[in-house]
Image (cartoon, rainbow, N blue to C red):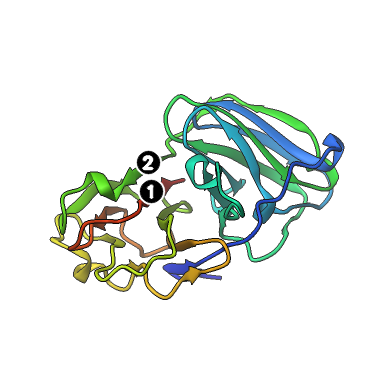
Amino acid sequence: MRRAAWLGAVLLGLLAAPAPAAERDLLLLASGTAAVEIALRAPAELDLRALTFRTTGQVAGLAVMDERGELVGLSVNVRRWVEGAARPPAPVSTAPGPLRLAKGRYRLVVVTDGPADVRVRVPATGGLARTLHARHPVPAGAELVDLRDVPVGEHVRRPAALRRGGALVGVLHERSAAHLASTPEVCFAEPGAPDCSAAQGTSAVLVGTTEPADGFSRLAVFLYGDEGVPARYDALARSPAVDLPRAVDVLLVRV
């Protein structure tokens, strides 16, 4: 079934604590973005919404790919979003519930920003409940940009290659519940596009997503590498036309 070209999702809530019983978790260890291949002899489940992590970088996540190289599920979070928060935000995830995997071969990709040491833990069942080392380098990764470092009203532009079966993810995260008079935005547009007006429906504007209980606002846009979707994009993020009273981060992920 052809997936939608983009999907907006705001996932906020309590970041689950690591489970004490290792046999109930999938624990992945990596130095930088890397992958490991596995073979499931029986169906298993992963709860990507409950991903927890430790990293010497800022970004940590897990992408699950099937044997055809198609993205099955993705979950990602950022250290500075979590540290010091009374109610840390849950990961940004493509999965609305536990990810059910049929028996077969899969590639598990630990996604991070740069050469960071990463531990990713996800509640799991069946043959997925084990410790694995991801050592195979892959062309995936993440970048975190603080819009306070971007001149007022200007754009951050990053060339982005979308491979068949993969995904590009742009996340806006405002570490404050304060309303912004002029909102930032993030999108994937045609290469060379001057702004998000040429994004063909993939723009995401940070508005109306505030959760007063924890003080975070987040909005994510996913662009999937389906048949007929162009391979080249510019990831654009615009700083608002006012000085930012609090930090607004843009997270760009490619898998």
Tag 1 near tag 2, CB within 8 Å: yes
The picture places residue 96, in percent across and down from the top left corner, at: 64, 66
Q: CA distance from mark 1 to mark 2?
A: 5 Å
For the point 42% across and 36% down, which residue is it?
139
158 vs 209, left or right, is left
- Local crowd size for mark 2, using a 10 Å CA cut-off: few (<14), some (14–19), many (≥20): some
The picture places residue 56, in percent across and down from the top left corner, at: 52, 27
User: In the rendered view, would you say 178 is above or below 112?
Assistant: below
User: In the rendered view, would you say 31 is above or below 2?
Assistant: above
Mark positioned earlier in the residue sequence (1 or 2): 2
The picture places residue 7, in percent across and down from the top left corner, at: 46, 68
For the point 22% across and 49% down, which residue is it?
157
The residue that label 1 is drawn on is 252
The residue that label 2 is drawn on is 143
Query: Could you tell me the amino acid type at mark 2?
Result: Glu
- SS for dot 2: strand
For the N terminus, the image quarter is bottom right
Q: Quadrant of residue 140?
A: top left
